[in-house]
Image (cartoon, grey):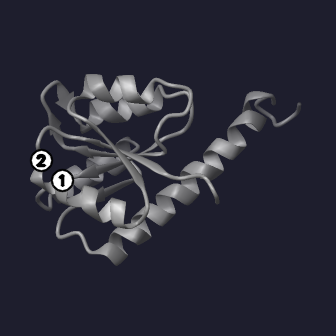
Amino acid sequence: MTERITALLVHENSDTLITLKSTLERQGMHVLHAGSQAQARRVLGGVDPAQLVFTDTQLPDGTWADVLAVAGEASQPVNVIVVSRVVDTRLYVETIETGAFDFLTPPFVDTDIAHVVRGAIYNVVARRAARPYAEHTTQDGRS
């Protein structure tokens, strides 16, 4: 894959996501920032939105679930990864069942983050590649 991967970090001064930013940049990703769900909506509203979104659990104007909904409205598929500063099994299950790609908590080990990012990128690239075909076929797969 030759295109550069862009990640959007959605948080308001979260030390957890600020730390994650450095990890993602070391992996060669272009990292954008949105301080609220409304800002994330503007960033993801373009024709070529970030492939990955890492969101804090709480934002000034909403929660991770609001960011997931915004990502669902993007013009291209986007994978959302929820980032919590603490382990919370109930929240983990809720985020995955609601449609988040993954759930992360610190400490952020480069190899672990690389594994999650690799899976998320593979998934979103495949979904984006399949989308034009899906838009031109009927539900039973006929053109």
Q: Amino acid at mark 2?
A: Ser
Tell me where residue 63 appears, x and y as whole percent: 20, 34
Above or below, 49 relative to 1: above
At 12% across and 28% down in the image, what residue appears? 60
Residue at the limit of the structure toward the right, as seen here? 143
Task: Mark 1: give few (<14), some (14-19) or many (20+) Cα within 10 Å.
Answer: some
**Looking at the image, how many numbered discs can be counted on the residues?**
2
Which image quarter: residue 115?
A: bottom left
How far apart are labels 1 and 2 at the CA level?
6 Å
Q: Is residue 84 visible?
A: no
| Residue at 54% in and 38% down | 77
Residue 6 in view in this figure: yes
- Eyeballing the image, is 115 above or below 18? below
The residue that disc 2 covers is 14
| Residue 125, horizontal then vertical, whole percent | 60, 51
Indicate the quadrant where residue 76 lies.
Answer: top right
Residue beneath disc 1? 18
User: With respect to residue 31, does 45 lie above or below?
Assistant: above
Q: Amino acid at mark 1?
A: Ile
* Mark 2 crowd level (few <14, some 14–19, many ≥20, 10 Å Cα): some
Going 20% across and 44% down the picture, which residue do you hit? 56
Please indicate whether residue 63 sits to the left or right of residue 15 in the image: right
Q: Position of residue 85 (x, y in %)?
A: 12, 56
Image point (64%, 51%), residue name: 126
Q: Secondary structure at mark 2?
A: loop
Determine whether the residue tagged by mark 1 lies in a helix, strand or loop.
Answer: helix
- The answer to whether the residues at label 1 and label 2 have Cβ atoms under 8 Å apart is yes
The picture places residue 57, in percent across and down from the top left corner, at 18, 43
Choose between 62 and 98: the one closer to the eye. 62
Q: Quadrant location of the C terminus?
A: top right
Q: Which mark is residue 46?
A: none
